[in-house]
Structure formats: structure tokens, C-alpha cells
Amino acid sequence: MTILKSSVNPHDPQFLQNHDNMAALVTDLREKVADIRLGGGPALIERHRGRGKLFVRDRIETLLDEGSPFLEIS
């Protein structure tokens, strides 16, 4: 495999600042995704299930064979 040469200095203050900013954005995104996966919080989840309904991910899970690959796009 060919090695690509880079002029990026990972010790440069601007590089370190960009790295820290990106890490903060990634953490924020992961927190938002985790909140979304909760489905609106415990009260809304209980109300939804109390109506005898399944969430979309639960419906998909019941349709797929165990161990089947599934890629959620959005």
C-alpha cells in the first residue's frame, strides 16, 4: 500500500484546537442520537406502549431474523 505524505503537524496549536472542537461536536452528536433513540423520554414511551403500539425499531426487529444484518440510514 502506498504511504501518503502529509504536511499536517499534529502538534500545531491550530490542529489541536480543531481536534478538540471536533471531539466536542462528536460528543454532542452522540448525546443527541442517544436521546433520539430513547423515543421522547420515559413518559412518552409508556404512553405509546400503553396504547399497545410498537416503536418502529421494535417493529423492524420483529420482522428480521435473529442475527440478520440491518443498516439504519435515517
Image: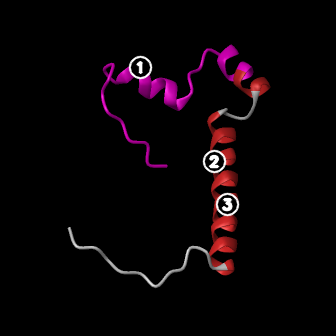
Image coordinates of residue 18 in percent, x first then y, are: 65, 73
> From what the image shows, is residue 4 above or below residue 53?
below
Upstream in sequence: badge 2 or badge 1 = 2
Upstream in sequence: badge 2 or badge 3 = 3
> Which mark, residue 20?
none
Residue at 20% x, 67% y is 1
Q: Inspect the image, locate mark 1, and give the three-letter code of the amino acid beneath it.
A: Thr
Residue at 67% x, 60% y is 25
Residue at 36% x, 80% y is 5
Residue 13 or 24: which is nearer the viewer? Answer: 13
Looking at the rendered structure, the secondary structure element under dot 3 is: helix
Disc 2/disc 1 C-alpha distance (Å): 26 Å
The image quarter containing residue 44 is top right
Label 2 Cα neighbours within 10 Å, binned few <14 / some 14-19 / many ≥20 = few
Say if the magenta span includes residue 14: no
Image coordinates of residue 14 in percent, x first then y, are: 67, 80
Say if the magenta span includes residue 72: yes
Q: Which residues are magenta?
A: 46-74
> Which mark, residue 62?
1
| Residue placed under numbered mark 2 in the picture | 30
| Residue placed under numbered mark 3 in the picture | 25
Disc 1/disc 3 C-alpha distance (Å): 34 Å
